[in-house]
Amino acid sequence: MAEPRADGGGETAAANQQAVKQWLGQLARGNRLWIRGTVAAGAVAGLATIVQMFLLARIIHLGVTDNVPVAELTPLFLGLILAILIRAIGQGFQTRLAARCSEQVRRDARRQIHKHWQATGPVGLGQSSAGTLAREWIDHVEALHGYFARFLPQMSLSMIVPLLVLALVFWLDWLAGIFLVLSAPLIPVFMALVGMGAEKLNQQHFETISRLSGQFLDKVRGLTTLQLFGQTTGAAELIRKRSDYYRRITMKTLRIAFLSSAVLEFFASVAIAVIAIYIGFGLLGYITYGPSGELTLFSGLLILLLAPEFFQPLRTLSQHYHDRAAAMGAGAEILERLNRKVDRHRSVELADTAAAIDVIELNSVSKVFRADHQVLKELSLTIRQGDVIALTGPSGGGKSTLLHLLAGFMAPDSGTIQLFGQTPGSFRFGWLGQKGFLVQGTWADNLRLTTPDASDIAIAAALRNVGLGPLLDSRKDGIHSTVSEDGHGLSGGQARRLSLARIFLANYDLILLDEPTAGLDCDSEVFVLEALHKLAVAGKTLIFSTHHQALLTLANRVLLVSGGEVRDA
């Protein structure tokens, strides 16, 4: 039974590799103009190099063999300088266009990842470590740079430039051209052999660093808890082992890179040496076969100057082959993310949106996480605009799931949901989870996440609406006081109210809150209750889960969520 599994695994790996190639090809097709521009600039630089070598060999031949005066060689010198300038300009444009191409490709890749994140929603993304997501967004996408900026254009240049050189060498001496033709395939063959192992190692490298990033970030975030329970030594040892494993994978990748480069340089040097021996013995008269008897200083020197230029594009391609391996490894990780099932925003047919424009309707909605655990079953519910709905019931009964369905963070397994005539996920609403979301910056920066054009006066008014007025007045920087993503500088209740202030600032019609007073002290609870009361008086539709008696009295309708059912309490 082991052999079929191995074959199946090999077929799966080949299919995954083919899928990554197709995805990279799609990115390339979208930026074909930049790639062609890069190749054209590189071809101009290669042609200028050939002209440069031709003029250099001609100058040396005329000066040494024919004793032509330097003054008569001035046009050739000027041509040589012009060829050098054109070569430099071509290489400059090649680098610039390649960077532009890479920038566009990385932007397209990040746009795809961002769309998938949006479609997945916070519930789905919560299943992945923040460190892993950050690595995919930054390092994995950056790993595509070398493939599109260097390897892909170089594939075309490794055909164009050597063919131009080969045509000129065959015109000068067909025997030397045969030597180049026979030695050229060695580099691509070894490049392919090395690449087979490099791709697998690079994918393993990206998988390892993604896991390490997630584990390290989790340990840093939970450092206080680890210290309280005396587990810092074990956590540090785990990170050390994972880091050492990552070091070994990295060293394997570097070892292949250095060894392959050394082997390829060796074969290129041997091929050039063979041609140099042939030219030398031909000029000395020891070889009289074929065109060797017609060799001159000009033709022999030009062939010697062109031989390294013949191999240079192939050597450069072999060096950039590791960029391909890195892109394949990173692309496999990114594509795995993009191919993950998205359980959101299912399209539903709205029979009569005009009739449901002022209500929230759930029709026969069911949600199952496990075969033995149906969280919601055949739920039908109508909520009028302006209602204040409290969801209560035992933990795990489905309160948060119902809120996530209304928010569009997940889709029901069956049934339909309409929010004032729109589908969940397409309707603008306010959200406050059990833990407020903050970013590193100022209070104003955090409030402007949802309302970028909000004025300073509006921000201050929103902060006062949630009871942060006294704290605002006591801070020298006011709304420009700094706060970290973990709320450093604010108490837990103050951080929660800072998040709640966004809702006042954005002026949402529908507001969903998941345990808004959980873990708060008495003073903070009072401020949150007063803020929610202001929203209710303003005619907002509030739906929140809670066990708090004061919040239950705020609602005009209390629903008990338990055993897959929702009924009036």
Image (cartoon, grey):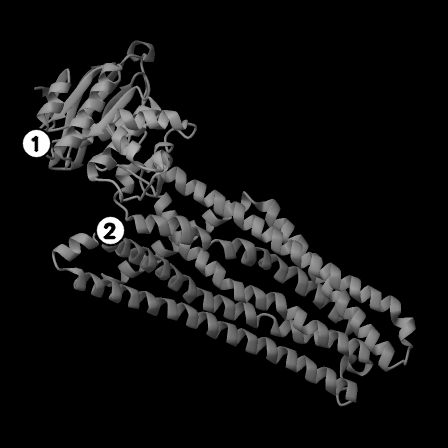
Residue type indicated by callout 1: Pro
Would you name the residue on which mark 1 appears? 394
Quadrant assignment, res 556: top left
Nearest-to-viewer mark from 2 and 1: 2
Query: Does 81 sit left or right of 192 as displayed?
Result: right
Is residue 544 in view from this perspective? Answer: yes
Residue drawn at the location 26% of the way across and 22% of the way down: 417
Q: Position of residue 239 (x, y in %)?
A: 25, 62
Screen quadrant of the C terminus:
top left
Q: Position of residue 82 (x, y in %)?
A: 79, 62
Residue 207 vertical placement versus 101 (above, below): below
Quarter of the figure with residue 87: bottom right
For the residue carrying disc 2, how many other residues have a C-alpha within 10 Å: few (<14), some (14-19), or many (20+)? few
Q: Which mark is residue 221?
A: 2
Q: How many numbered circles are shown?
A: 2
In the rendered structure, find residue 45 and report the number of the disc placed on it.
Answer: none
Quadrant in the picture for residue 293: bottom right
Asked whether the residues under the numbered discs 2 and 1 touch, taking CB atoms below 8 Å apart as contact, a structural biologist would say no
